[in-house]
Amino acid sequence: MVGLQYLSGDISGGNARCIAMLQAFQDAIRDYTVPSEKTLVRDLTAKISSYVSFLIECRPLSISMGNAIRFLKSQIAKLPLTLSESESKSSLQSDIENFIYEKIILADKAIVEHAVTKIRDGDVLLTYGSSSAVEMILLHAYELGKQFRVVVVDSRPRLRGKLLLRRLVEKGLSCTYTHINAVSYIMQEVTRVFLGASSVLSNGTVYSGVGTACVAMVAHSFHVPVIVCCEAFKFHERVQLDSICSNELGDPDAISKVSGREDVNDLDAWANTENLQLLNLIYDATPSDYVSMIVTDYGMIPPTSVPVVVRKYSREQVWI
């Protein structure tokens, strides 16, 4: 069920996808019984691997989901042989519950507390797409009575910024909505840029929704601080220098059509053109040079300090 929701796009966003996956694993563990002549550790690890393979068939895993799966498998491997089947299952279920609460929910609260100190009265804050962490920061700052304006920058084909815009306007925030092709025009009045991230790699590169790098580079050229908000469980020891060597490909038909514009049909028969391919990248890589600060649950750090967080987080995982 979760895999099909990934496929249809009903569940999107790094945290939502990770939580849905972990809750599905919780249900699977609750319903699991150890076959005769098999051990729980080996058989359950194999079962989890088969579930992961199905999820990958539906949509490639995000880096944060890979980290969560690694955590769960390490917890299964650490189970003492003296525990009964029911005790082992309840132990794993509480481990998953703790992971969701500590690494995602509490982490977001910590990020909000840190980031809100960077918002001042009179600020014009720009965000791109839709990040759950950035949304919480903006709403919390508004609740504290800070006077600021939000610019939501969006891009085709997903137009996720529209959903964020609707939620912010409903809460009473003053907003401006524009597409990414106008970002250099709107950037002249912006005082800070807040961006979400799918992952932060160990060389400080921010791996996020396609278009993020463009927004960060324009902000850098206008000397506007770029603040990236990312939970520590999304950090990864991998290094990536560009968006081509590793990425997720979206549906090419999505970029051949313009919603609400039936007259724009130049690419309708693109599949029949032998020497034409459409490339719909899902993520891009923002070099650390264009990022002023990364706000995590451990505090506010420069991109150069990312390896420290990666090391600290992996050490924590060993002791959890």
Image: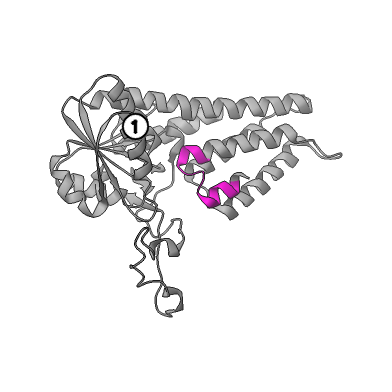
Corner quadrant of residue 199: top left
Q: Nearer the viewer, residue 267 or 190?
A: 267
Predominant secondary structure, magenta span:
helix
Q: Residue at x 41, y 72 (%)?
A: 268
Residue 285 versus residue 139 in the image, above or below: below
* Residue 226: % across, % down: 24, 39
Q: Nearer the viewer, residue 185 or 106?
A: 185
* Residue 254: % across, % down: 42, 61
Residue 262 versus residue 314 in the image, above or below: below
**Quadrant placement of the N terminus:** top right
Tell me if 35 is positioned left or right of 13 in this view.
Answer: right
**Mark 1 lies on residue:** 170
Residue 172 visible here: yes
Q: Residue at x 44, y 64 (%)?
A: 253
Among all residues in the image, which is located at the extreme top? 144
**Quadrant placement of the C terminus:** top right
Tell me if 289 is positioned left or right of 210 in this view.
Answer: left
* Residue 33: % across, % down: 79, 35
Amino acid under label 1? Glu
Magenta-colored span: 3-17
Residue 320 visible here: no
Magenta residue check for 11 = yes
* Residue 235: % across, % down: 42, 38
